[in-house]
Amino acid sequence: MMHPYLPLTEEDKAIMLKTIGVDSIDELFSDIPGAVQLNRKLNINRGMSEIEVQAYLNNLSGLNKNCNDLVCFLGAGAYDHYIPSLTKHIVSRSEFYTAYTPYQAEISQGTLQAIFEYQTMIANLTGMDASNASMYDGATACAEAAQMAVDSTRRKTILASKTLHPETRKVLNTYLKVKNLKLVEIDESDGVTDIEKLKAQLNKEVAAVIIQTPNFFGIIEELEEVEKIVHQNKSLLIVSCDPISLGVLKNPGEYGADIVVGEGQALGNNLNFGGPYLGFLATTNKYLRKMAGRIVGQTIDTEGKRGFVLTLQAREQHIRRDKASSNICSNQALNALTALIYLTTLGKKGIREVAVQSMQKSHYAFEQITKSGRYTSVFNKPFFKEFVVTSNNSAKDINEKLLENKILGGYEIDKEYPNYKNSMLFCVTEKRTKSEIDKLAYVLEGSK
């Protein structure tokens, strides 16, 4: 055998060629013109043994620095929260990580029930009536929510605050542009949505207004006034939120949101250098039938026993084809299961504790960093677990100094907001200790 994992012998090959009626592999591909054939060996390294491959991959992985090597104060949409060890042990069971789309309800009850419980928790957390079975990530969930609003109102303009995550705004633009829909971005003022500019852009063509709270700068947006002016215009209010913040803040449902979206990575999923993650999307009963993706419902069988099924399906794979509400062909079921296990493990009190500690520690860090006056606050607004500070020095240079001290520093705000030069967005979660925060402040103070 030429390869230990390909069990074909030369005798097997000979039998197969004879059955086909050719004498060699070359003859098998004789219909391909010689001019387009490679006629040389592939330019790849020689084969390696298992030991060599393992050593090679270990060396490659050693080039990365992760949150086990560095103390993380970087957030901006992906967060280093503590993940209970129970989570990975349950989610690693083979019946979960090998499960695929539960088309046949009669043999997929476990998967369907897990998704149903996930939906229930997301609905409860956000204050909405129903949730779908999760989406690719927070950005695409937001884009699907915008399409829901367009379908529901038959209007073709979406307003999005510039305090919405920059990457989400880019994904929104991509989705809407190809559907000939209009995206209008509303300027921010002192780190929050400019209400007057929002009012000026509202008209009868606006399907929805998208607001993030806590927003990209970490600031808690004032949604009461936004909700009033949006609904007076008969537009929908889409709120993007950090699910952890809902442990201490009012949920979007209490503000009158019509659709709630967000990134669920913080709910027990590892950072993983950027994915896979999961997007959550929840809504009120009024817009349930316009909701993208899968929804699992609870029912009873002919014997009166509880059961679970995919319900309200309007996807192109199933029935409505061109009238389908979404082309989402996969939910992030394993990541959603991880979120379910995380929420179940922590419970209401645990989620609140994570949120409280994150909030308290971030405010302590803010005080320590700004007390000397070398770093100053960019916005004078209430924040949850992220805050923006500025100094006279380059944010890039400061982060390099922090990295030398094994600290993963803040996000350089001027990458997306050039008017905030030398500004950094720091994130502090419940994992950070007082000594780690004090070290951050000490290194920052010495950064030239």
Image: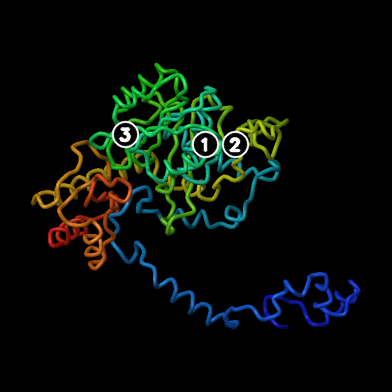
Q: Which residue is mark 2?
A: 326
For the image, the number of numbered tags is 3
In this picture, residue 132 sits left or right of residue 31: left
Residue 166 point in image, percent of width and height: 38, 44
In this picture, residue 429 sits left or right of residue 286: left
Coloration mode: rainbow
Residue 218 point in image, percent of width and height: 29, 42
Q: CB atoms at circles 3 and 2 under 8 Å apart?
A: no
The residue shown at (58%, 38%) is 293
Going by the numbered disc 2, the residue's amino acid type is: Ser
Mark 1 residue element: helix
Q: Tag 3: Cα neighbours inside 10 Å, few (<14), some, or many (≥20)?
A: some
Going by the numbered disc 1, the residue's amino acid type is: Glu
Report the residue that reaches farthest toward the front: 35
Q: CB atoms at circles 1 and 2 under 8 Å apart?
A: yes
Q: Which residue is mark 3?
A: 187
Which comes sooner in the sequence, label 1 or label 2?
Answer: 1
